[in-house]
Image: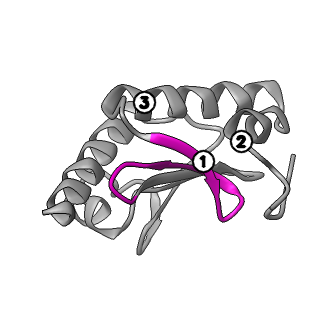
Amino acid sequence: MPRKMDLSVKNIDEFISRYPKNVQAILQKIRKTVRQVCPDAQEKISYGIPTFTFHGNLVHFSAYASHIGFYPGSSPILALKDDLAGYETSKGTIRFPIDKPIPYDLITKLTKLAVERNLERKH
C-alpha cells in the first residue's frame, strides 16, 4: 500500500488501482458517494490524493495503513462534531479506521455541507 505522497499519479483511477482490492472498494464507494451528492464536481489529483472540486476544492480523500483520510475542510467537521465524536479529527481531517465500517452516510452529510460552503463562498 502506498505510504507517501506520490505526485506522479495522474488521475483517481490510477490512484485507487495502487491499493489492495478491499481498500479499492472503499475508495470507489467514497468516490461514488461524493459524486451522488455533487454530480457536477470535477475530479483531479491535488496534493497527490483524490480531490473533488466544485467552486473550489470540495473534498479530498486517501487511504493509509490503518485508516481512510477524508478531508472536507474545517466547517463541515465543526458542524457535525457530535456525529464525529467516535473518530479522530483535526482541523480539516477525519480518520475513519480501515478495520471498521466506513460511515458513508456521514460522508454524504459532510460532502453536502462542503457543497453548501462552496456555494456560499461563490456569492
Residue at image location 20% in from the left, 65% down from the top? 121
Q: Amino acid at mark 2?
A: Asn
Which is nearer the N-term, disc 3 or disc 1?
3
Which is nearer the N-term, disc 3 or disc 2?
2
Image position of 20 (left or right of 44): right
Tell which tag, 3 or 2, sits nearer the viewer: 2
86 or 50, which is in the foreground? 50
Magenta segment boundaries in residue numbering: 42-56
Q: CA distance from mark 1 to mark 2?
A: 6 Å
Which type of secondary structure does the marked residue at label 1 adopt? strand
Residue at image location 67% in from the left, 24% down from the top? 25
Q: Amino acid at mark 1?
A: Lys
Q: Are marks 1 and 2 in contact (CB under 8 Å)?
A: yes
Image position of 18 (left or right of 45): right
The residue where tag 3 is placed is 35
Q: Is residue 122 visible?
A: yes
Q: Quadrant of residue 38?
A: top left
Q: CA distance from mark 3 to mark 2?
A: 15 Å
Image position of 1 (left or right of 97): right
Which is nearer the N-term, disc 1 or disc 2?
2
The residue where tag 1 is placed is 44
x, y percentage for residue 79? 20, 60
Q: Quadrant of residue 91?
A: bottom left
Local crowd size for mark 1, using a 10 Å CA cut-off: few (<14), some (14–19), many (≥20)? some
Image position of 85 (left or right of 7): left
Residue 11 badge: 2
Q: Quadrant of residue 40?
A: top left
